[in-house]
Amino acid sequence: MNGGGGARSAEASRAIQQAVAQGDKAAVADDAKFQLKKVDNYYGSTAGAGSGEFHAYRHLRRKEQERMAALEKSDEDARARNEFNARRKRDQEAIDAKSRKRAEKRKRQKERKPPPPEPKTNAVEKKKGEDEDEDAEEAMRARKLNKFSNDGSFLDAVNALKEYAAAPETK
């Protein structure tokens, strides 16, 4: 079976083993490529053919053609799938690069933007001396408004006032 498409000769096998030993991957890859094995054991259509041989020949011929068509179709499908995946990967890398570029631009714009101003406590800025005067005035006003002492007994005082107001006057 030396002349067949799929079998290797002893010399070719030795050459591959030597290439592997020497580390020559290119030589191994070239020789190890897939080779189609064509079936050539079909009947001829004329020489010594009986009345039924023609039909057997046609059947074998049709099967071989279908097999070769299926191999070619699967090879074409694999090639198309590889092209699609390569195109998809290339497009995805372009999209990612564009997204990265936009993100960097947003980051640069954010860094250039000045920080927001500090919120003001009052609408009008006050001078230091005025603050102390206003605090003292506010404390005086609070003392005048508060009729209860601030010892934590506010609720007790309110309840006592309620009881006093509710009690009947006896004189």
Image (tube, helix red, strand yellow):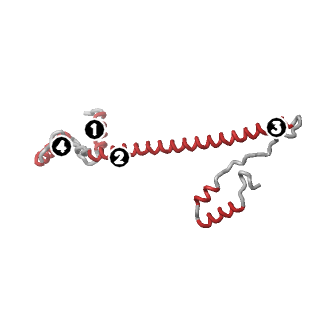
The Cα atoms of the two marked residues, 4 and 1, are separated by 20 Å
Work out whether mark 1 precedes mark 3 in sequence or the reverse, and give the earlier one: 3
Dot 2 falls on a residue whose secondary structure is: helix
Work out whether mark 3 precedes mark 4 in sequence or the reverse, and give the earlier one: 3
Work out whether mark 2 precedes mark 3 in sequence or the reverse, and give the earlier one: 3
The front one of 13 and 129 is 13
Dot 4 falls on a residue whose secondary structure is: helix
Residue corresponding to mark 3? 45
Residue corresponding to mark 4? 143
Q: Which mark is residue 161?
A: 1
The Cα atoms of the two marked residues, 1 and 3, are separated by 128 Å
In the figure, is residue 71 to the left or right of 122? Answer: right
The Cα atoms of the two marked residues, 3 and 4, are separated by 126 Å
Residue at 73% across / 46% down in the picture? Answer: 38
Dot 1 falls on a residue whose secondary structure is: helix
The Cα atoms of the two marked residues, 2 and 1, are separated by 70 Å
Work out whether mark 4 precedes mark 1 in sequence or the reverse, and give the earlier one: 4
Q: Nearer the viewer, mark 3 or mark 4?
A: 3
In the figure, is residue 100 to the left or right of 131? Answer: right
- 32 in relation to 81, above or below: below
